């Protein structure tokens, strides 16, 4: 599985951005897809998740401002970020765990990360 993230950039407080992540390779093994973020000097945190059937989960810290969506036909997941705050500044990563039945374990696949910087 390969994940390609895009859509980050430099914006001002209150602006919006839409992040995109395209999956390729053995995408049939993917069920839930995630967005994580990691701010400088902080641990990586989960921002949002969406299952193949569209059930979504949003972190409390971004609830009401961020939404996650998915296009299974295009194997793309989007993170719509509205009302951005300075504390949303981070590198955003898409993630897709898959089950490796031969080894009996989950394998995490990560995109390369896309930088989001929110200035006041």
Image (tube, helix red, strand yellow):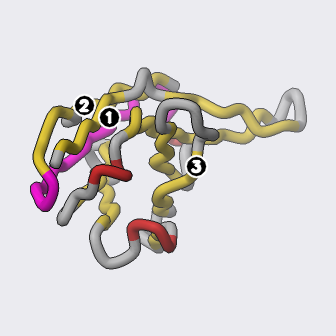
Cβ atoms at labels 2 and 1 below 8 Å apart: yes
Tag 1: Cα neighbours inside 10 Å, few (<14), some, or many (≥20)?
some
Q: Does the magenta stretch include residue 21?
A: yes
Q: In this view, does 92 lie to the left or right of 110?
A: left
Image label count: 3
Task: Identify the residue under disc 2.
Answer: 6
Task: Identify the residue under disc 1.
Answer: 22
Q: Is residue 25 magenta?
A: yes
Tag 2: Cα neighbours inside 10 Å, few (<14), some, or many (≥20)?
some
Residue 15: percent from the left, percent from the top?
10, 56
Specify start and end residues of the magenta stretch as a single range.
13-27
For marks 3 and 2, give the CA distance. 19 Å
In terms of depth relative to the viewer, which is nearer, 109 or 116? Answer: 116
Cβ atoms at labels 3 and 2 below 8 Å apart: no
Q: Which residue is drawn at 26% across and 41% down?
A: 20
Disc 3 versus disc 2: nearer the observer: 3
For marks 1 and 3, give the CA distance. 20 Å
Residue 97: percent from the left, percent from the top?
63, 41
Task: Identify the residue under disc 3.
Answer: 45
Kind of element beneath mark 2: strand
Disc 1 versus disc 3: nearer the observer: 3
Chain-order first, disc 2 or disc 1:
2
Q: Which residue is drawn at 39% across and 38% down?
A: 90
Q: Residue at x 52, y 39 (%)?
A: 95
Q: Residue at x 22, y 35 (%)?
A: 8
In terms of depth relative to the viewer, which is nearer, 110 or 83? Answer: 83
For marks 2 and 1, give the CA distance. 9 Å
């Amino acid at each position: 599985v390969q994940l390609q993230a895009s859509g980050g950039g430099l914006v001002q407080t209150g602006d919006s951005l839409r992040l995109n992540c395209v999956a390729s390779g053995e995408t049939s093994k993917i069920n839930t897809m995630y967005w994580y973020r990691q701010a400088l000097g902080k641990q990586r945190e989960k921002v949002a998740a969406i299952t193949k059937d569209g059930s979504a989960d949003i972190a409390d810290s971004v609830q009401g401002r961020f939404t996650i969506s998915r296009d299974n036909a295009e194997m793309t997941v989007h993170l719509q970020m509205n009302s951005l705050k300075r504390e949303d500044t981070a590198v955003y990563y898409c993630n897709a765990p898959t089950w490796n039945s031969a080894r009996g374990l989950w394998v995490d696949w990560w995109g390369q990360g896309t930088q989001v910087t929110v200035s006041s």
